[in-house]
Amino acid sequence: MLPFGIPSCLAEHLVDWLTLQQIIETWETRFNEFARRRPDVTIIPTTHQSSRPTSPQPVSVQQRDPLGTRLKARLHQSKAHFQSEIADDLFLEAELMMLAFATGIMDVVTFPDYHVFVSNQTGNSALLAVGALGLGGDLISLPHVGTSLGVFAAGGLISGQLGNVFGRKRRLWLFVTNLIQTALVFTAAGLRQRASHKPSMALNLGIIALLAFASGAQVAVARTVEIPEVSTAMVTSAYIDFLVDRNIFRLHNRARNRRAIFVACCQNIRYGRISSV
């Protein structure tokens, strides 16, 4: 018996219990310090029940969510995004309108210098007939007109058939083909800068060919995304479709609005510049 009448066996258990409490408090303090210093490490609670306190086990490199796994997940999401098809929404319409505006700019730039269109092949067909009959004089260059017509057709053929293979509305295909078209336009701009210092027929034909191929590919893509009101180049059909629309005077007519905006984007800048030549 100990003082105060406490049995010795009970005193031993009381000491063990107090010691255990001190150990638990010590490990809790260490755990909190560890969590503050390493917030990126996940602590997995153990399922083994033991009376002894155990130290927190940090997750190994393989058990964590490493950077490589997150990158793989992000790449998988990006791949799925690019493999999906675009939606017929206002964003797509805005893109096509911007392409139509850029098409008008290209014709405005090329016609005063080369007397040929790179996208408006209806006008080139008329120029070819007039030139072949010898009625145009020096204003019409048959090599320029022929190059534009032929290369435009090649661009439309190649882009259209590749679109059939890879998916006309697939995001990856549209991204790649527009990237190629942009590269062709920038290359033509570089050649135009060089031709301003050393003009030659070869450079002129090269510039026309690059722009005509890009235009043909652009029109082929625009015609296959299933928004027929916006072809980004030819406006004759848009004029007629606008005029014969049975709902032309209806307040809410999305197809009519598409055609009107398309004609405005394509023609305003084109007519304004060419009429001043």
Image: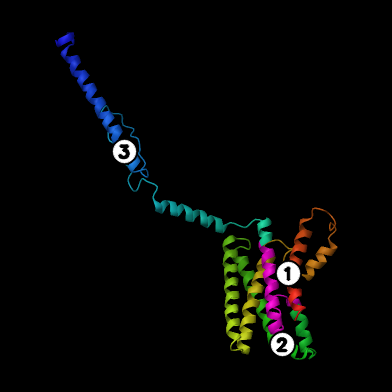
Q: Amino acid at mark 1?
A: Cys
Q: Residue at x 71, y 87 (%)?
A: 142
Residue 9 shows in the view: yes
Asked which secondary structure carries label 3, the reply is helix
In the image, what residue type sits under mark 2?
Leu
**17 up-or-down from 149: above or below:** above
Tag 1's secondary structure? helix
**10 Å crowding of disc 1: few (<14), some (14-19), many (20+):** many
Q: Quadrant of residue 180?
A: bottom right
Provide residue 7's location: percent of width, then percent of height.
Answer: 17, 11
Q: Residue furthest top?
A: 5
Let me know if residue 102 is in the magenta part.
yes
Which quadrant would the C terminus be assigned to in this image? bottom right
Where's residue 186, x and y in %?
Answer: 58, 75
* Residue under the point 76% across and 76% down: 122
x and y percentages locating residue 130 in the rendered image: 79, 86
Tell me the distance, in whole angstroms, between the alpha carbons under discs 1 and 2. Answer: 25 Å
* Earlier residue among tags 1 and 2: 2
**Magenta residues?**
95-122
**Magenta-colored segment: predominant secondary structure:** helix
Residue for point 78% across, 88% down: 136
Res 243 quadrant in image: bottom right
Q: What residue is pinned by disc 3?
A: 33
User: Which amino acid, by three-letter code, is at mark 3?
Assistant: Glu
Pair 2/3: label in front = 3
User: Which residue is label 2 attached to?
Assistant: 142
Up the image or down, 49 lies above or below 162; here it is above
